[in-house]
Image (cartoon, rainbow, N blue to C red):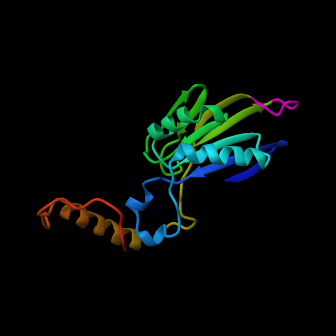
Amino acid sequence: YAMFDRDGVKVAVVGLSFIGTPQTTLAKHDAGLEFRDYAPTLKQMVPAVRKAGAEVVVVLLHDTVDAARRVAAETKDLSIAGFVAGQNHRKERFEVDGTPVINPGPFGRSYVRFDISVDRASRKMLKVEHEIVDVVGEVGAPAFPPEPQLLAIVEKARQEAKARAKDKLGKLGRPLPQGTFQN
């Protein structure tokens, strides 16, 4: 988690990695890491971040909004301000018992803005508003445009790849095995 001070309010952002990571990546990339169920992890972490001073907690969950919906329902007693999901690439938002669960969409083309009202005396959340904000302008535009000759080479390669995309190169005799990558 990371802790931020926003206008005198301590905000903790708790990040949860995709629980299926050991099955979807090379073992060397997650060596020494543990991937635990989301709800029990939050039931352990949220009290810890509150003890560290957090008055507001937001969860970033690298999983689908359906997974975030289940976790929000299982942790509704923790007073989490909102969940931001991001495994699937669809813009979606809904609430679970008043807690927003949002996927702003893919590739940094949009983000979630939270406006959270906190009572200054009791330090308790009063209201959580959110919106998905689209990023405008050129996302990832190069600082220097490529040379026309380079663009011509790239376009020629792109057309050749498109023409060959329908070529059948081979066929598997059986489905690929599923499970943990070992190399």
Q: Is residue 136 visible?
A: no
Residue 120 sits inside the magenta stretch: yes
Dividing the picture into quadrants, the one containing residue 134 is top right
Dividing the picture into quadrants, the one containing residue 101 is top right
| Observer-nearest of 167 and 146 | 167
Rendered location of residue 110, percent (x, y): 55, 44
- Left or right: 79 with respect to 142? right
Rendered location of residue 14, percent (x, y): 64, 49
Q: Is residue 70 visible?
A: yes
Reply above or below: 34 against 40.
below
Rendered location of residue 148, percent (x, y): 42, 69
Q: Main secondary structure of the magenta part?
A: loop
Q: Residue at x 51, y 53 (%)?
A: 36
Q: Residue at x 67, y 53 (%)?
A: 1
Q: Residue at x 85, y 30 (%)?
A: 122
Reply above or below: 96 against 30.
above
- Left or right: 118 with respect to 84? right
Q: Magenta stretch?
A: 119-125
| Observer-nearest of 44 and 68 | 44
Question: In the picture, which quadrant includes the C terminus?
Answer: bottom left
Rendered location of residue 35, percent (x, y): 50, 56
- Left or right: 155 with respect to 71? left
Q: Residue at x 23, y 67 (%)?
A: 160
- Which residue ends up furthest to the right in the rendered image? 121
| Observer-nearest of 139 and 15 | 15
Dividing the picture into quadrants, the one containing residue 9 is top right
Number of marks drawn: 0
